[in-house]
Each structure stands twice: as C-alpha cells, then as structure tokens.
Amino acid sequence: LSAALDIGTTFSGYAYSFKGREKDIEGCKNWGANVSVCNHKTPTAVLVNKDGKFEAFGYEAQERYKSLEEDELQMYSLYERFKMQLKHTEKLNRDSMSMALDQRSFPLMDIFTMTIRYLKDHLLKSVNRGHGRSVDSEKIRWVITVPAIWSGAAKQFMREAASKAGVRDINRPMQLIIALEPEVAGLYVASKYQTSGTSSRETDAFRPGLEYVVMDCGGGTIDITSYKIQPNQTLNQIYEATGSSFGGTKVDDAFVEFLSQIAGLDVVSTIRQESPIDWLQLMITFDHKKKTIQNKESDKLNIEIPYSMHEIAWEVTGRKLSDIVNNQRIPGVKCNKRMLIIDHDIIQDLFRNPVQEIVNHMKKLMRLPQLKNVSTILMVGGFSESPILQAAVKEAFGKRVKVLIPDDASLCVLHGAVAFGHNPNIVSSRVSRMTYGQGVMVTYDPEKHEADKQRAEVIESIERQTNMMLIYVKRGEVIKVGQVKEFTSFPVRVNQTQIDHEMYCTEKSDVGYVDEEGVEHVGSWTTPLEGKGLDREIKVRVFFGETELVVQTRQIGMGDKEWVQRSFDFLSS
Ligand SMILES: Nc1ncnc2c1ncn2[C@@H]1O[C@H](COP(=O)(O)OP(=O)(O)OP(=O)(O)O)[C@@H](O)[C@H]1O
Ligand SMILES: [Mg+2]
C-alpha cells in the first residue's frame, strides 16, 4: 500500500492505492459533508483545548470552533496556516511555536504531529472499511509531501513530526519518504496524459526527450521544478527548485488590507482579536467567493458581513460601519446592514500583485539558458484553478510553450505522491538548490592561503588554515539519485577522541570558508575516534539526490567497523 499525506497551507488530504492496482487511487472524497460541502481535501485547521489536547481537524475543527459560546472560547484555540511557519521561522527548531487565531501559541511540532496523526488514522480507517480488514503496517509505504524549496531543517521537522505521529518505524527508514510537491504532481500529470494513448496536445507534451516546468501554485507556496523525460521514462531535473510565498493566501491578505482601508485598521484589528469566530467566518466566505472570480467583467460580488463587525465599528469609532465605508465614496464599494457589495474589478485587483509576482518569477526563470528547451508549462495546485492566474501565465508564455492545466489541479500533488510511493526511482537525477559542505582545517600553505592569513592558527605546533569549507555538493550541480561521494578528514590533535563535523550550506555556488557572508550553519554530528595520532583517517560518505541528504562516517583501519549513519541534525543549530 502506498499511502500519501499532503499537508497544505490551506487544505490537506490523503490518498492511497494498493500494489498491483496502482492507478485505483482512493481517498476521502467527501470532507465537509457535515457543512454541506463535498471536497477531496479539508482545511488545514487544528482545534486544541486548553489542556493542549487535540480536539478536531479540518472542517470539523472550524465548525466546532464556530459553534463555541462566548464563555467557552478561551478553552479552545484554532490553529491554521501553520505550514508557512516552517518556511519563515528563522532558526527553526523543535521548540518553535505556532500562533492561533486568538493569538495564543502552541508548539509547532505538536500541531504538525496532531495533523499527521489525524490524517493517518483517517486513512487507515478508510482502508479498513474499504477492504474489510486492516493492512499490515509493515506493508505500508508512507509518503509525506513538502515544497521543493523547503530547507533541510523544514524537511527534518516534518520527518520528526511523522515519527511522533507513528508514521515511521525507526528501524525501517524507507517506510516514510518525503516527496517534493511539484515533482510528484508533474509525475502524475505526465503519466496520466502518457497513458491516455492517442496522440493529443497533452500526450505530445510528455514524450521522451521533452522538457517541462511544473508550477505548483498552492495556498502558501509557489513551488517550481523542471525536468527532462528520459527514453526510459525516468526524469532528470534540469534546474534547481525555485519559488516564492505568493500563493493564494496572498489574495486573502490583500482582501484584509482592502477591508482595513474601507473600514479602518482599528475596526479590523479589533474584530480579529475580539471576535475570532466572525473573523474566521468572514475569511471562509471570502475564500468561497474568491473561487468564483472569473477573468472577465461580471456581476458585483456580495460578501456577507458578520453582525459583530457593525457593533465593533460602532464601539471603536462611534459611527455606523455603513457610514464609514460609504462616506469614503470609493468607486465600486458599497456597504449596507448585511452586505459589502464590491465591483468585480476591485476583487480582480486583489489578485494583481500575487499574479504579477508569479509571472515575473516565471519570466526570470524561463530566460535561463538551462530552460531554453522547455516546451510545456504545467500548472497544478489550487491557485492554478484561478482563471486570472491561468490567463496571465498563458499570456506571458502561451506563444512560446504549451500551458497545460489538468482539471484536478489541486489534487495532483496527492495523486502523484501515491504513485511516487510505488516507484520512487522514477526520478533519476536532481539539481542541488544549495551548496553543502563541512568545515575543515588543513595544513597552512602560504601559496594558497596567504590572502586569508587571518584564518591561520597554530594547533599542536602545526600551522592550520581554519574554517575552510569542504564542499560536498555545489549549488546547480546535477546529482544522480543514489550517487555517493567520499571525503576524508583527519584529527588536528594527537589525543583527539572525536571529530565534530559541522555542516554548512549557502546559496553561493562558490565558497571557500564557512565564515563567509551568506554561509549558514545547518547542523553537526560527531564521529568517535579510537587510538591516537594525526594520521587517523575518517571517511565521510555523503548520499545525494534523494529528496534529503544522508551522511555516513567511519574511521579507516579500525577493524571492520560498519559505516555509521550520522543522524544529521538540522534542527538543533
Ligand atoms: N478557482 C480558484 N480561484 C482562485 N483561487 C483558488 C481557486 N481554487 C483554489 N484557490 C486557492 O488555492 C489555494 C489552495 O490551493 P492548494 O490546495 O493547492 O493549496 P495548499 O496545498 O493548501 O497550499 P501549499 O501547497 O502552498 O502548502 C487557496 O488559497 C484557494 O483559495
Ligand atoms: Mg499544496
């Protein structure tokens, strides 16, 4: 069984299929039935009670929260949009906190663990129901998807949360694979079109030898990767993953800003704080309306205003909300007791900035020589369903390449992740997004190191050049999946009992020293040393091209010691 979980910024879901019937992908197709919606994904929302216990997830969490009485409110907190924090928290670590709608906070790790556990249990129940028996946990390959542009720390964070949620058996690391969202979405679409058989515009886009770019435009992230299809149908990545945070929620943010302009910042921030339930409802209403926005002139848009907003406007300003709004005489905006009535082009305006950012990013990317042979742009993710974004991308690139948008754009990641779980070797090479390496000291050599003399230091009477970066992989370097590189290091003290390997990364492709600007410490591990002397040789073996980096070390000549996998801790630094 391949079982995939997609935890999105705004929506989450799961899907699975059995070996032998890989294409029969199943999942929950009626999330939100209790609130009369029917969706393949459910909102990424976690309801936690004041004792820190999990209460509910998704539509159910939102509904439970909305039905709380005033005096019950302080007993529960609703956490949403927490995925973005993994990207934006500086120095992400195990104690990073997540912020709830009511400004309370809770450990981010626990929120992720609750989310994964909930989806996992829901999936297993669905499997059992459908098949009349439970599946042996050893026979399940779990796949959790993450944006391709995430850091090693964010990926490790997800892995640890998965472990805590019982998705991973410590003795079987391959039971859980971390898959890259745009990559698997592209895989799914390509294989869907390839197997549709007859020659068509879509099928022709995915013939061996052709190159394509996938844009996963989600709620929080725009995540872009590119591939060349090999004769044996495996994929080679042709350029590193890039992207930005200009997802669909940027349109929501623009709406909040617009509200602050027409109703006043005080009114908006007071309602957010004092009436979180009404605020939640307002944003849900907006999300629904937003999905109906077309790219052409159409009717006005009515957005229901919660009653408390009127009350708060009165309390804060002493004026009626409708007066505050209407007196500004903003063309295309009217307010009455129940509704905010907005002209269509004002709503379209809210899309302008994020859409422009996405198109500009793509323009820069498509100009790169590495991408000059790309013949198709594939748009996936929920935001790709927006006719405004579609039109902008087609206008910018439609003359040069095919722009394809599958009908199930927001589910491609999930379905692709299931397929990837069955066949993770489908991607045969990837391009490193960062330069990775380790800090080392070498014997000082005046010819090479003269210019950087300030880094020299005498240790046990040998002059050493310190802080040098031993590069494992350079940014932009193509690495075959499963490729291994070996490096050697030696102790600098005769009686040294361990080597501390300090790992660094940088966006620079050329770097000499770990203390240069733009180089970041990302983790460390130690190799115990036996014996004495400066000639004790330590081998470092680095495995690349999987979706994560794995490092092993061993001391040479110490019996037949096995390679020791050094768990690489991105989260402690
Ligand atoms: N027809 C539409 N028009 C405009 N926006 C849409 C439409 N359909 C979905 N969206 C937006 O797309 C986003 C959801 O997309 P998706 O489910 O792919 O994101 P996610 O997986 O939650 O986020 P991410 O992948 O960034 O973590 C939401 O912001 C939603 O409002
Ligand atoms: Mg997504």
Image (spheres, grey):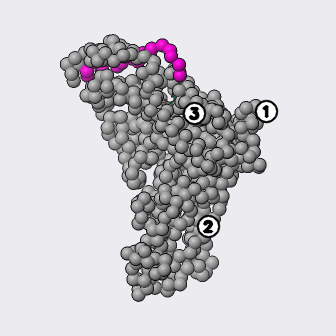
Which residue appears at 62% of the width and 42% of the height? Answer: 213
Give the alpha-carbon distance from disc 1 to disc 2, as whole Å.
42 Å
Q: Say which of 207 and 54 sits in front.
A: 207
Image coordinates of residue 450 in percent, x first then y, are 43, 78
What is the magenta range? Answer: 295-313
Q: What is the secondary structure assignment of the residue under circle 2?
A: strand
User: Within 10 angstroms of label 2, few (less than 14), some, or many (20 or more) residues?
Assistant: few
Q: Residue furthest left?
A: 318
Query: Considering only vertical position in the picture, is 209 above or below 218?
Result: below
Q: Amino acid at mark 2?
A: Lys
Q: What residue is shown with label 2?
A: 485
Q: Residue furthest right?
A: 198
User: Within 10 angstroms of label 1, few (less than 14), some, or many (20 or more) residues?
Assistant: few
The reply to whether the C-beta atoms of the residues labelled 3 and 1 are less than 8 Å apart is no
Q: What residue is shown with label 1?
A: 199
Q: What residue is shown with label 3?
A: 396
Q: Which of marks 1 and 3 precedes in the sequence?
A: 1
Q: Amino acid at mark 1?
A: Ser
Q: Amino acid at mark 3?
A: Ala
Q: Which of marks 2 and 1 precedes in the sequence?
A: 1
Query: Considering only vertical position in the picture, is 496 above or below 141?
Result: below
Give the alpha-carbon distance from disc 3 to disc 2, as whole Å.
41 Å
Which residue appears at 58% of the width and 65% of the height? Answer: 542
Closer mark to the observer between disc 3 and disc 2: 3
Q: Quadrant of the C terminus?
A: bottom left
Which residue appears at 62% of the width and 50% of the height? Answer: 370
Q: Which of marks 2 and 3 precedes in the sequence?
A: 3
Q: What is the secondary structure assignment of the residue under circle 1?
A: loop
